[in-house]
Amino acid sequence: MDSEASALGATGTEVVPPPRRGAWRKVAIDVRPLRHPAYRRIFIGNVTSFFGSQLTAVAVPVQMYQLTHSTLWVGYLGLAGLLPLLVFALWGGALADVLDRRRLLLTSSTLMWAVTLALLVQALLRLDNPGLLLALVALQSAAVAVNMPTGSAIIPRIVNRDEVPQANTLNYTASTAASVAGPLAAALFIQHGVGWAYAVDALTFTLALWAALRLPALPPQEATEARSGRLSDVAFGLRYIATTPVLMLSFAVDIIAMVLAQPRALFPAISAQRFGGGGIGWLYASIALGSVIAGLTSGWIARVRRQGVALIVAVVAWGLAVAAAGLARQLWLCVLLLAVGGAADLVSAIYRQTILQTYAPDRLRGRLQGVFTAVVAGGPRLGDIRAGATAVPLGLTGAWVGGGIAAAVLAVLLAVAFPMLARYTTR
């Protein structure tokens, strides 16, 4: 058959071959989910609001220290934010399974915006009340805990199923970029007063409200066992995870990675003792920078079918990169290795989120995203406690390097002992 005939279909009509992606486009981040108007609006709202929230995340502890001159009070902010996040993430996920997710997203977003305005007002009025700051942080954390699982459960409803990994990649890449740019911008605004940081946060958050308002109605798609977001509904979601090995193992490897290998609590001491007090900013930014670079070159992620294996490999790479960074005696090498770990962490996060969103039925996605939020928020904080506690008997290097190696080894042992996750594919 000559070349002209081979270009014709059975009916004689010309067959147009699919466009070939160039070498760079095969590697570059896949932006096809942005074709969907609903997702595009949510993405824009998330990017701008997350950037603004990073300003507040820096401004609140700065203001608390200015008021109290006590690092203990600054530590209380973490406790005030963690407890509501753990409780309301589970409850908010249950609500997302029985209510219209658009309305729930809009309600929680409005509450988050109102708390930011309250932070702005107390700063402008110079109320100077540490207790008020703690209360506002707790209220904001509760609203975030409802907002996050609801927003994540919406994603599979507004993009094609095979575009869920790309959508998650875009979200994670944008959030990590904001984690780098937000604190740097916060430092500039706070020089003129913390009120400026709160004002910019409130302004950027209006786009998140606009995005939630423009979503279509998203009622439950199918019959659900949940009835009213009660405690029994939360317990049902937990039981589902406990009886679903693939999901249970995906949560387990994340807990291993964050609790054992998260080194950030050691950054100040390492900066002072190993790098002469310099490079603290680079240490804190390094993991996020690696995640951003990985996100921008993530075109290959959606083409991986054995996502379970990819998740395990990413966790092992995270642990080994962190361990190697703990041995580095040059700042540039430590930052480089932490960036490699950040890249692996982004890949791990994308696959965990994608497995959860595509494996679980829609009627349970809210509750499971609530558990996901609790694990993602609680794991790094437990990792900070682990790092600080083990540094006393093991020393800084032992706590840092030992945690990374332990995470990598345990992830491998878990995969061998329970092979269900390694066998998981997109099929």
Image: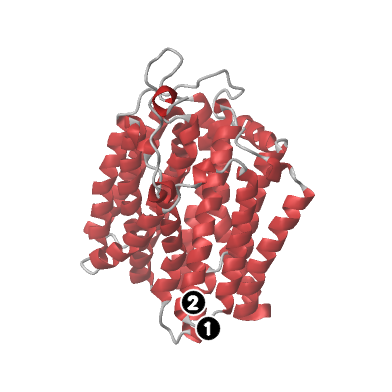
Q: Is residue 284 above or below residue 411?
A: below
**Dot 1: few (<14), some (14–19), or many (≥20) neighbours within 10 Å?**
few
Residue at the (26%, 41%) spot, across then down: 206
| Residue occupying image coordinates x 51% and y 85% | 274
Label placed on residue 156: none
Task: Verify CB contact (< 8 Å) between mark 2 and mark 1.
Answer: yes
Q: Amino acid at mark 2?
A: Leu
Report the front residue among 352 and 67: 352
Q: Tell me how far mark 2 sits from mark 1, CA to CA.
A: 8 Å
Residue of label 2: 333
**Residue 220 in view of the camera:** yes
Q: Position of residue 304 (x, y in %)?
A: 56, 43
Identify residue type, mark 1. Arg
Q: Is residue 287 above or below residue 328?
A: above
Identify the residue at image location x=58%, y=38%: 356
So how many labels did they put on this image?
A: 2
Q: Which mark is residue 329?
A: 1
